[in-house]
Image: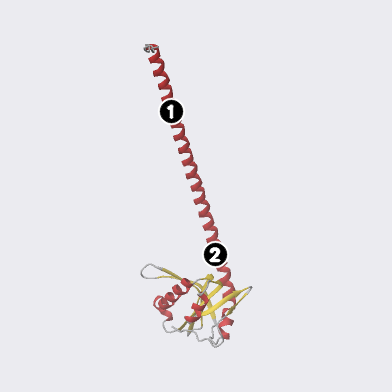
């Protein structure tokens, strides 16, 4: 039995079926592409929301640290004169948040300065004391008299006040000859031994 030659109608029908299949495949591709674009849009929207949430969290963290830092500064400043006088440094008054601008355009700020006209104790306040804070503070102490020449003839000491300390940070303070002041509850105390001799600049 031989197969009859396809008629023109058969060829036309086959052409139409093939065209319909191509059109359906194209429709499916377009739908898949639309879904990919929608998914991409959703990912971008989710990423934008994550970034916005992260930005707000950082703002809240900065606000918390700023307010907490101010509270700690007040706590330390309230006890500082008595603490230093007990260590033989006859401090009479304090200045908080001393700010200035250097000739090269950089700004500086010192949390607390305790002074008596002849001696100055520079105090940096940190909620969590870390080793790099100590290293940075030493750099600032080395530059202090250059930045503030009015204290050039004063005997200069350094102190760092903290609530908690990372491993090794407190020992760095002692090794560098700095006063270590720990905030505890509603007061502060110098944790250096009574025979501690502070480094003078």
Q: What x and y, as percent, mark residue 80?
A: 57, 79
How far apart are the alpha carbons under marks 1 and 2?
A: 59 Å
Neighbour tally class for label 1: few under 14, some 14-19, many 20 plus, Cα within 10 Å? few
User: Vertically, is 151 above or below 5?
Assistant: below
Residue that protrudes farthest toward the front in the picture = 1
Secondary element at image label 2: helix
Neighbour tally class for label 2: few under 14, some 14-19, many 20 plus, Cα within 10 Å? some
Residue that protrudes farthest toward the right in the picture = 186
Name the residue nearer the viewer: 58 or 35: 35
Query: Would you name the residue on which mark 1 appears?
Result: 25
Q: Quadrant of the N terminus?
A: top left
Q: Is residue 6 left or right of residue 64?
A: left
Name the residue nearer the viewer: 147 or 49: 49
- Asked if the residues shown at circle 1 and circle 2 are in contact, with their CB atoms under 8 angstroms apart, the answer is no
Q: What x and y, as percent, mark residue 92?
A: 54, 82
Q: What x and y, as percent, mark residue 176?
A: 47, 80
Mark linked to residue 65: 2
Mark linked to residue 6: none
Q: Earlier in the sequence, mark 1 or mark 2?
A: 1
User: Vertically, is 127 above or below 11?
Assistant: below
Q: Residue placed at 42% from the left, 79% from the top?
A: 150
Q: Residue placed at 45% from the left, 30% from the top?
A: 28
């Amino acid at each position: 039995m031989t197969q009859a030659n396809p008629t023109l109608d058969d060829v036309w029908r086959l052409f139409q079926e093939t065209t319909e299949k191509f059109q359906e495949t194209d429709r499916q591709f377009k739908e898949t592409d639309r879904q990919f674009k929608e998914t991409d849009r959703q990912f971008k929207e989710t990423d934008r929301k994550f970034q916005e949430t992260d930005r707000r969290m950082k703002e809240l963290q900065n606000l918390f640290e700023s307010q907490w830092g101010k509270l700690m500064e007040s706590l330390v400043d309230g006890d500082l004169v008595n603490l230093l006088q007990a260590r033989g440094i006859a401090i009479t008054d304090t200045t908080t948040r001393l700010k200035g601008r250097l000739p090269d355009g950089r700004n500086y700020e010192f949390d607390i300065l305790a002074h008596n006209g002849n001696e100055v104790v520079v105090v940096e306040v940190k909620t969590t004391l870390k080793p790099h804070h100590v290293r940075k503070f030493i750099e600032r102490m080395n530059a202090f008299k250059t930045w503030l020449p009015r204290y050039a003839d004063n005997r200069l000491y350094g102190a760092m006040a903290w609530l908690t300390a990372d491993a090794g940070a407190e020992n760095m303070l002692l090794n560098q000859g700095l006063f270590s002041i720990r905030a505890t509850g509603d007061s502060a105390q110098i944790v250096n031994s009574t025979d501690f001799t502070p480094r003078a600049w």
